[in-house]
Image (spheres, coloured by chain):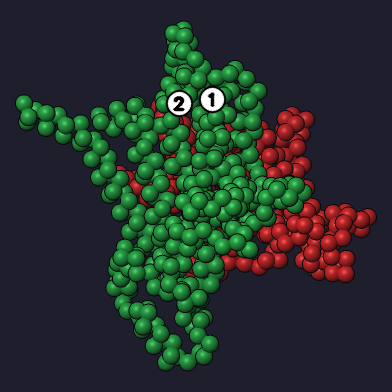
Chain colours: A red, B green
Amino acid sequence: MRTLSKLRIFDAWAILILVLVLAGFFLTPHDPMSQAFRSEALEGPSISHWLGIDGLGRDFLSRLWRGAANTAILAIACLAVSLFLSSGLVAIEQSGPSWCGKLVRMLVGLWVALPVIFIGLLLLVFLRPSPGALVLAVGFGNMAFAFRQIRVYWIGVRGALYVKSSEVLGSQGWRLFRWAIWPNLKPDLFALGRLLFAISALELSGLAFLGLIGDPDFAELGSILKQNQAYLFQAPMLVVLPGLFLSLMLLTTHLTKFHR
Amino acid sequence: MAKTVSDSSLHKKSPLWRFLLGELRRFILIFLIASLGIFLAIEAMPEDPVSLRVKNPDPARIEEIRDTLGLNDPLPIRYVTGVRDFVTLEWGKSLISGRSVRDEISRFLPATLELAILGVCFGVTFGVTLVLVAHGTGWRWLLQPVRGLGALGLTVPIFWIGLLLILLFSVQLGITPVGGRFDFAYASPKGTGFFLIDSIISGDGEALLITIKHLLLPVVTLGLYPAAVVSGTLEARLGESYLQRLVTALRARGFSPFRIWGKHVLRLVSGPVVTVIGTQAGALLGGAVLTETVYSWPGMGRFLVDGVLNRDIFVIQHGLLLVVVLALFVVTFSDFLATRLDHQLAKKESE
C-alpha cells in the first residue's frame, strides 16, 4: 500500500495545492460572481475580505480562488483533448496502412506550423467565445506537439528488447500493453502531461486575457487579470495576485516528481 | 572544360534548389490548406455577418448586399475568388469600419513587425551574450539567470510580466509611458510605418526618443521568451564534448576568449539557434498579440481579435491568412538560414 509517507515531499505539496485549488469550486468565502460589495469597491484587505474587493464590488479572494480552480480544470480539459487526439493519431499512424501513416505525419507537420493563437481565432470564427471553445482551441493547438512526443515514446518502448521478449513468451494484445509497455511508457507520459498542463494553462489564460472567453465576468485567472488591468494605478494587487497564483500553480506542477 | 565547370556548379547548386523547391511545395500546400480552413470556418459561422451590420433588417436589402459582396456565389467559386483576391491584394472593405482591409492592415502590420523584430533581436542578443560571456569569462554565476529564464517561459505568463513592468517602470518610477506607440501630443513620423526607421530617416531626435521610450517595455516583454529559448538551446549545445575539445584546442593556440567564443564557437552553434527561433515563430506571434494587448499597441493582434469577435469576414479571411503566410515565411527562412549556418545540416541536405 502506497501511503503518504512514501510520497516525496514535492508530490505531497503538489497534491495539497491541487486539492486547495479545486476546493475553490465550493469553499469560497463569498460568491465570486456576486457584486454584493459595490459600495466598498477597490477597498484593501480587511478581516471579512482578506484580499480586498475588486472594482465591481466582488470579494477578491473568492474570485481568485474560483479563478484558479477554473483555470486548473480547463487546463486539465485541454490536456485531455490534446492527449486523446494525439494518442488516437499515433494509433492510426502506427497500426493503419502506410499511406495513412504518411498522411498523418504530413498533416501533423503542417499543423505544427500554425500558431495556437491562429487556431484559437479560427475556431472562434464559427464557435461562440466560451471556455469550451478555448479548451478546444488549446487542445487542438497542442495536438501536434503531443503527437510527436508520444510517437517517439511509443516507438522507443515498442521496439525495446523486453517488449520483444514478452511477445516471444506469448504475451500479446492488452496483456502485452498492460504489463510490458505501459509501466515503461508511464513516466514519459506523466512528464509530457506536466509540461502540457503548464503550456495549456498559459495559453488558455492568454486567450482569456485577449477577451476570447466570452463572458468577461467568468472567473479565470487570465480574464480576471484583463478585467483588473483598468485598476493598475489604484489597486495594483488586483493585477499582481492573479499572475502570482497562476505562476505558483505552474511552478508546483513542474516541481512534482510524480512518476518521474 | 567549360562543360565540366558548368556541371560542377550545377551539382553544387542542386541541393539548394532542391531545398527551395521542397520548401515552396510545403509553403503552397499549407497556404491552400489554411485558406480552405479559414474559408470553411467562415462558412460555418453561426450568424450572417451582413445581417449583423444592417440596421434595417430588410431581407431584400440584405440579399442585395450579399450579392454585391459575392457571398451568394457557389462555394467553389467563392473559395477560388477568395484566394485570388488574397494573392492580388484585393482584400475588400471592413464590414465594421467600411475602410479598406488592405489599408487597415498596412497601418497595423508595421507596428506588429517592428515590435516582433525588435523583440527577437533583443531576446537573441540578450540570451546569446549571457551564455557566451558566462563561458568566455568563467563567471558561471551568469548561468543562473539562464536557468531562471528557462523556467520563466513555462511558469510565468508573458502578459503578467508586461503588467509588472508597467507597474515598476511606468507607475512607480515614471520612466516609460504606460502604453501606446507614440505620444498623442506629437505628430508621429511618416514614411515606412516603422516609427524607429522613420524618425531616424527624418532626423527628428525628439520623435526617435519618444519612439524608443514607447518601444522599451514591449520589446523587453516580448524578448524574454526568445531569450529563454535561445539561451537554453545554446547552453545545451555548448555542453557537447566536441565543442569542449575545440575550445581547449583554441585556447592552446593562444586565441583570446572573445575570438574563441564570439567567432568560432558562435559560428558553430548559430544553426540550431536559428532553427529554434524559427520553430518558435508561432509562439512569438502569440506573444506579440498578448504584448500588444498589455501595452495598447495598435498592431495586428487587436485588429484580428476584434475582427473575429465582430464577425468582420474580410478582415478574418485575409488577416488570418496573412498571419499564416508570415509564420510560414519565418519558419521557411529560418530553416534555410540554419542549413547555411550549420555545416552538419548542410552536409545531410546535400547527401
Image quarter where the N terminus of chain A lies is top right
Q: Residue at x 27, y 40 (%)?
A: B19
Q: Position of residue A257 (x, y in %)?
A: 66, 32
In percent of width and height, residue A196 lies at 57, 44
Quadrant location of the C terminus of chain A in the rendered image: top right
Quadrant of res B4? top left
Q: Amino acid at mark 2?
A: Leu
Question: Contact, CB < 8 Å: mark 1 with mark 2?
Answer: yes
Q: Residue at x 34, y 39 (%)?
A: B336
Q: Are marks 1 and 2 on the same chain?
A: yes
Q: Secondary structure at mark 2?
A: helix
Name the residue rendered at 59%, 17% in the picture: B138
In the shown orientation, is residue B121 left or right of residue A197?
Answer: left
Residue beneath the point at 58% across and 46% down: B219
Residue B239: assigned label: none
Q: Is residue B258 left or right of residue B89?
A: right
Q: Please, is residue A94 above or below residue B203 in the view? A: above
Closer to us: A73 or A4: A73
Residue B188: quadrant of the picture: bottom right
Which is more toward the observer, B31 or B41?
B31
Q: Which element carries disc 1, helix, strand or loop?
A: helix
Number of numbered discs: 2
Compare residues B108 and A20 and report the one nearer the observer. Answer: B108
| Label number found at residue B132 | 1
Toward the top, the furthest residue is B252
In terms of sequence position, does the residue under pointer 1 or pointer 2 come before the other? 1
The percent position of residue A115, horizontal first and vertical second, equals 48, 52
In the rendered structure, find residue B266 and report the number of the disc placed on it: 2
What is the chain identity of the residue bearing mark 2?
B
Tell me the kind of residue under disc 1. Answer: Leu
